[in-house]
Image (cartoon, grey):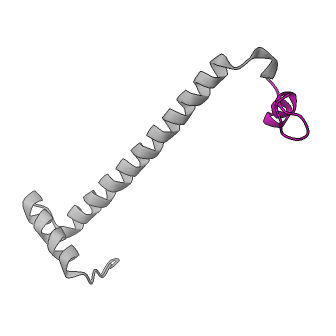
Amino acid sequence: MGEQLNIKDAETIDLARDLARQLGKSVTATIREALEDKARARADQRQAKINAINAVVDAFQQKMPDEWRGKTSAEIMDEIYDEHGLPK
């Protein structure tokens, strides 16, 4: 016998069996497909967040002053603020 997974929640079992019946698939295939769909959706959400962050970075870099290019954030902060954290 292959790998096993014991589901001890009756409602979860009923949901899996009901969906399997609706899809005309086995419970195993239905659960696998549902897990794959969920994993794919999470990966898509993660990629969408990465794309949004990259868009913000790109927009900032387009508007970033030339004198900041090639400098670390610490170097930029040192140019903007004095040793007490107040704007120069």
Q: Quadrant of residue 22?
A: bottom left
Q: Is residue 39 above or below residue 48?
A: below
Magenta part of the chain: 70-88
* Of the pair 85 and 62, the residue shown nearer to us: 85
Residue 74 sits inside the magenta stretch: yes
- Does 52 appear in magenta? no
Residue 10 rendering spot, x and y as whole percentages = 19, 81
Q: Position of residue 82 (x, y in %)?
A: 89, 34
Front-most of residues 81 and 48? 81
Q: Residue furthest right?
A: 83
Identity of the residue drawn at 41% across and 45% down:
45
Q: Quadrant of the C terminus?
A: top right
Q: Position of residue 87 (x, y in %)?
A: 82, 31
Residue furthest to the top: 66
- Position of the N terminus, as image quadrant, is bottom left
Q: Residue at x 43, y 48 (%)?
A: 43
Would you say 9 lies left or right of 76 here?
A: left
